[in-house]
Amino acid sequence: MQNRAGHQENLKRVWILIIVLVAIVLSGCGAGTGKNKNSKDPLAEYIPEWTSITYISNGNMVTLQPPFIATQNLYGDLNTGSCTGNTIEVNFNGIYNAATITSLSLTGLTATNNSNAGTFNFVACMALGSASVTITAYDSDGNALRIPLIVSLAAVNFVNTITLGEGHPRYPNTGLAMMSAAPRLENLTSGSTKMANVYMGSVAGKSTASTGNTGYTMETGLTNYVKQLSP
């Protein structure tokens, strides 16, 4: 009987020891101890969001909306908006929590920050080629949020069809004045063949200066046409 009572006492002590160890382990993983590697990031709820990327193509506004593809191609007009020097004006737009985020920055391109009251807008001038753009948000203590916004861009010029004057500082209103460089010849007769409305002469190029901006010219080649009357 004494052996049986001693055995039960030992089991009771073992169970007490197990309970104590479990309590210690659970208390070591509790909130606020710093040991929980999967604790919730309070800033994750305030990450900025994209709304659009916009630029001008063939004189019209193009709007790209998220999610963006791996590399976003921009077929933009050169020298648009506030941009000069054969660059494309690109607007990066989105929203953010103004109560938590106090500032934002854009890297990858030189840009003007017009962000205000929960809406961000960066205006950048992008040359032909590629760029990786990153927008980073900061809290009131100057800490960067762990997940920035990133987009890869490729500014591509049109290779098949180019609008007259594209690339000019005042495109699409370039202010170029054109005129014929060939003499006008009429009523030509050669044997039994008569012609009318003939514009013939040596095929030559003409350099025309811009009437809007000094220092810019356009080289043109002239194509003649012949209207045959007979036979």
Image (tube, grey):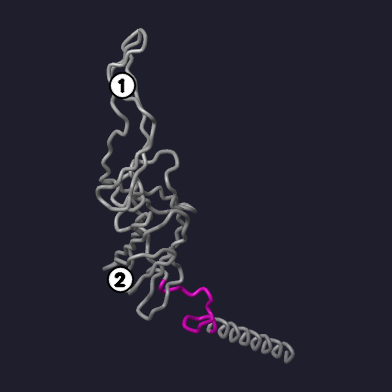
The image quadrant of residue 206 is top left
Q: Please report the residue visible at 29 percent of the width from the left and 55 percent of the height from the top.
A: 81
Quadrant location of the N terminus in the rendered image: bottom right
The image shows residue 227 at horizontal and vertical percentages of 32, 17
The image shows residue 92 at horizontal and vertical percentages of 36, 59
At mark 2, the secondary structure is: loop
Residue assigned mark 2:
98
> Is residue 190 in the magenta section?
no
- The nearer-to-camera label among 2 and 1 is 1
At mark 1, the secondary structure is: loop
Q: Relative to residue 27, is residue 167 drawn left or right?
A: left
Residue assigned mark 1:
198
The image shows residue 42 at horizontal and vertical percentages of 41, 74
Main SS category, magenta section: loop
Q: Are the residues at dot 2 and dot 1 in contact (C-beta closer than 8 Å)? A: no
Pointer 1 local density, CA inside 10 Å: few below 14, some 14–19, many at least 20? some
4 vs 205, nearest the viewer: 205
Image height check: is 63 above or below 112? above
> Where are the magenta residues, as a range?
28-43
The image shows residue 45 at horizontal and vertical percentages of 39, 68
64 vs 226, nearest the viewer: 226
Pointer 2 local density, CA inside 10 Å: few below 14, some 14–19, many at least 20? some
44 vs 212, nearest the viewer: 212
Q: Relative to residue 18, is residue 198 drawn left or right?
A: left
Which kind of residue does numbered mark 1 sit on? Val
Q: How many marks?
A: 2
Image height check: is 62 above or below 150? above
- Label 2 and label 1: CA atoms lie apart by 70 Å
Q: Please report the residue visible at 47 percent of the width from the left and 52 percent of the height from the top.
A: 69
